[in-house]
Amino acid sequence: MQKIKFIIILLLTSIVFYSYGSNKPQNKFDYDKFKAEKIAFFTNALELTPDEAAVFWPVYNEYEKKKWELSQEPRIMDEKFLKGIDKMTEEECIEFTRKYSSFQQKDADINKEYNEKFLKVLPARKVVKLYITEINFREHLLRKYRDYGRFNNNNNF
């Protein structure tokens, strides 16, 4: 499950970066629009009251920032190692596996830390809904991207 979650996150990150890196102004990724859509999606799905939203969003934004920063580590590792994996020595492969598993541990530590923080600002039922909502939002983005490509010739997000 952790691998699937990681792959989905990397896929979505790649989609976002690909669309953001486009030089065509009409296809430029609008982060503010994306963020507003995500806030509306989550607020609605979690049925957040104004008081809950006021304490939830700062914690969630902090969580998202830490996850984003952490997600950059394997991307750098991927670029460095995967291009030349056949030329790597046994020691380099061991180093790579240790760094990769270290990344997985850091990810788990962030999830554990923020689970406790979420439980302090939301009822447990809404924290469970939060995890489901994250999956549903990723699926929503994938459907949106797929549908956009179907109706647009240039396939940019």
Image (cartoon, rainbow, N blue to C red):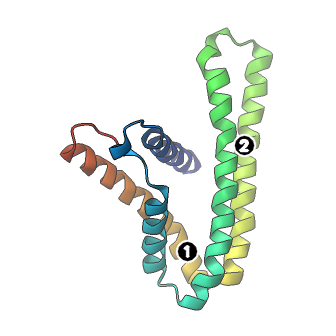
What amino acid type is highlighted by mark number 1? Val
* Percent position of residue 114, x then y: 71, 67
List the single residue furthest toward the left: 151
**What's the mark number on residue 128?**
1
In the rendered structure, the answer to whether residue 141 lies left or right of residue 95 reads: left
Q: Is residue 30 above or below residue 127?
A: above
Q: Is residue 84 above or below residue 39?
A: above
Q: Is residue 30 above or below residue 131?
A: above
Whether the residues at callouts 1 and 2 have beta carbons within 8 Å, the answer is no
Q: Secondary structure at mark 2?
A: helix
Compare residues 156 and 103 and report the one nearer the observer.
Answer: 156
Q: Is residue 79 visible?
A: yes
* Percent position of residue 5, x then y: 53, 50
The numbered mark, 1 or 2, whose residue comes first in the sequence reads 2
Q: Is residue 157 visible?
A: no
Please tell me which residue is depicted at 68% across the width and 30% down the height of the picture.
77
Please tell me which residue is depicted at 56% across the width and 82% down the height of the picture.
125
Please tell me which residue is depicted at 22% across the width and 43% down the height of the picture.
152
Q: Quadrant of residue 57?
A: bottom right
Q: Secondary structure at mark 1?
A: helix
In the rendered structure, the answer to whether residue 107 lies left or right of residue 157 reads: right
In the rendered structure, the answer to whether residue 100 lies left or right of residue 132 reads: right
Please tell me which residue is depicted at 73% across the width and 73% down the height of the picture.
116
Q: Count the marks: how many?
A: 2
* Percent position of residue 53, x then y: 57, 82
Report, in whole angstroms, how far the alpha carbon at label 1 lies from the one at label 2.
24 Å
Q: Quadrant of residue 23?
A: top left
What amino acid type is highlighted by mark number 2? Phe
From the image, tell me which residue sits under label 2: 103
Q: Is residue 70 above or below residue 153?
A: below
List the single residue furthest toward the top: 87
**Disc 1 packing (10 Å; few <14; some 14–19; many ≥20):** some
